[in-house]
Amino acid sequence: MAFEERLSSHEDRTWSLLVGVMMWLPAELDTYLERVAKLSHAEYQVLRWLSLSEEREIHMTRLAATASVTPSHLSRIVARLQERGWITRSSDPRDARRTLAKLTDAGADIVAVTEPGYCAQVRRNVFAHLTPAEVHGLEDIAEAVLTPLREDCVKVLPPRTSQ
């Protein structure tokens, strides 16, 4: 198998910066969420996506896509959140082969208490450093990279806004 040419110095620097963001931003958010709610970032994303859905209930496969976790990782996360009384699981009454995850009132309370501080952390760590044009550019870049990797994750996101 032939090796491709090395990354150019510009590609290498850009890739290194992206890897740094992928490593350090989730770690920063994990630290914050652990301190204020004893949650990991992945656990919080599951609760958050459930809170955003009508009925606070989503099929597990769709929840994995929206929360950007693998189905097996989601099962472990949901089991932990279920133990804390923040999520319930049940068979879909219309299709018993599918499992529904539902946010409980206690889970909704955790999201309500945590969301303002989480949003402030994201703004402080990401959006405060970007112009509105850069935010749009970041959205475009993230979508362009994620779509071929996991189009299902992109398809379940809310539509673009003009803001």
Image (cartoon, rainbow, N blue to C red):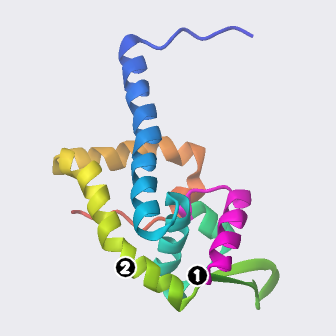
Residue named by callout 1: 86
Decide whether residue 115 is among the magenta residues.
no
Relative horizontal placement of residue 163, taking residue 1 as reference (left or right)? left
Residue named by callout 2: 113
Count of marks, rendered view: 2
What secondary structure is found at the residue carrying circle 1? loop
Q: Residue furthest left?
A: 131
Residue 78 position, x and y percent, is 66, 71
What secondary structure is found at the residue carrying circle 2? helix
Q: In 3D space, how far apart are the residues under numbered discs 2 and 1 (Cα atoms)?
A: 13 Å
Residue type, label 1: Trp
Residue 99 position, x and y percent, is 74, 78
Q: Earlier in the sequence, mark 2 or mark 1?
A: 1
Q: Residue furthest right?
A: 97
Decide whether residue 80 is among the magenta residues.
yes
Residue 54 position, x and y percent, is 50, 86
Residue 53 visible in rendering? no
State which quarter of the image contains the C terminus.
bottom left
Residue 106 position, x and y percent, is 52, 87
Name the one closer to the observer, 59 or 44: 44
Task: Identify the residue shown where x is 22% and y is 44%.
Answer: 134
Residue type, label 2: Val
Task: Identify the residue shown where x is 60% and y is 11%.
Answer: 4
Q: Residues within 10 Å of mark 2 (few under 14, many from 20)?
A: few
Q: Against 161, is 57 above or below?
A: below
Relative horizontal placement of residue 80, taking residue 55 as reference (left or right)? right
Q: Which residues are magenta?
A: 66-86
State which quarter of the image contains the N terminus.
top right
> Which of the 4 image quadrants contains residue 103?
bottom right
Residue 128 visible in rendering? yes
> Which of the 4 image quadrants contains residue 142?
top left
Task: Identify the residue shown where x is 55% and y is 62%.
Answer: 67
